[in-house]
Image (spheres, rainbow, N blue to C red):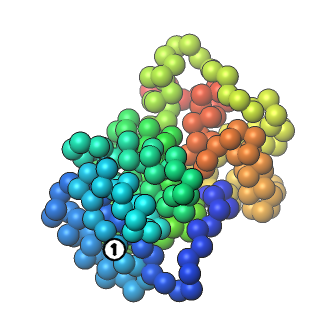
Amino acid sequence: MSAVEERPARPRAGDRPLRVVLADDQALLRGALRVLVESEPDMEVVGEATDGAEAVELARTAGPDVVLMDIRMPRTDGLAATREITADPALNGVAVLVLTTFEADEYVVQAILAGAAGFLGKGAEPAELLGGIRTVAAGDALLSPSATKSLIARFVSQQHGDAGAVAVSGLDALTVREREVLVEVAGGLSNAAIAVRLGVSPLTVKTHINHTMAKLAARDRAQLVVAAYESGLVRPHPR
């Protein structure tokens, strides 16, 4: 699921290849990823990091479009590195795509909250990974709807327990239609599917999402899902 126009497109000079940094402490996996990425004529690997600190340094010096970030690494982990990259205005053009062994991992949600553009399991098919790189490099969010909903619902439940909804700044400023769109986004629907369900055009849906993001100060689609659950606008289904 991608979120068109929910982040500014990351411009690239001319037709130069997408520049990718690989961050993983396993040399064998980095080698396999390098072979895969460099098999594509529109991509190149510009650096390899064995921990989060190296990933941040390469994000600043190698000029990547995308950092493929493992979460569990020694010393500085991928979560801390993601926070540092996305918090640095000078790295606004760098997208972080998290790679994880287990999608059912609380750290994945924290990475998304920290600004990661999305995540993929390490068991993803090669075409899925390459497509994911292109998706986040274009400024879109890459989310697995079912996994993301499940993870965020569990995260919110763990954070707030039985206390129920929490105040989400900007929620009261949403129009009725913007709230409806937010609910559908939290349900994992694409913009096209939301347009069909609400009987509006996809362009109208994108406009509502952009306005909602601005009002809630959300970086991307994933953070809209979190806001919907935290506010109580959407509630986890009982197991």
Whether residue 94 is situated above or below residue 106 in the rendered picture = below
| Residue 81, x across and y down, in percent | 38, 47
Residue in view at x 37 percent, y 38 percent: 107
Q: Identify residue type, mark 1.
A: Val
Q: Quadrant of residue 179?
A: top right
Residue 146 visible to the viewer: no
| Residue 238, x across and y down, in percent | 50, 25
Q: Is residue 62 left or right of residue 2?
A: left
Whether residue 188 is situated above or below residue 156 in the rendered picture = below
Answer few, some or many: residues within 10 Å of disc 1's Cα (few below 14, many 20 plus, some between 14 and 19). many
| Residue 65, x across and y down, in percent | 47, 68
- Foreground of the two, 186 or 238: 186
Q: Is residue 41 left or right of residue 28?
A: right
Residue in view at x 23 percent, y 56 percent: 50
Would you name the residue on which mark 1 appears? 45
Residue in view at x 50 percent, y 32 percent: 153
Whether residue 203 is situated above or below residue 89 in the rendered picture = below
Residue 86 visible to the viewer: yes
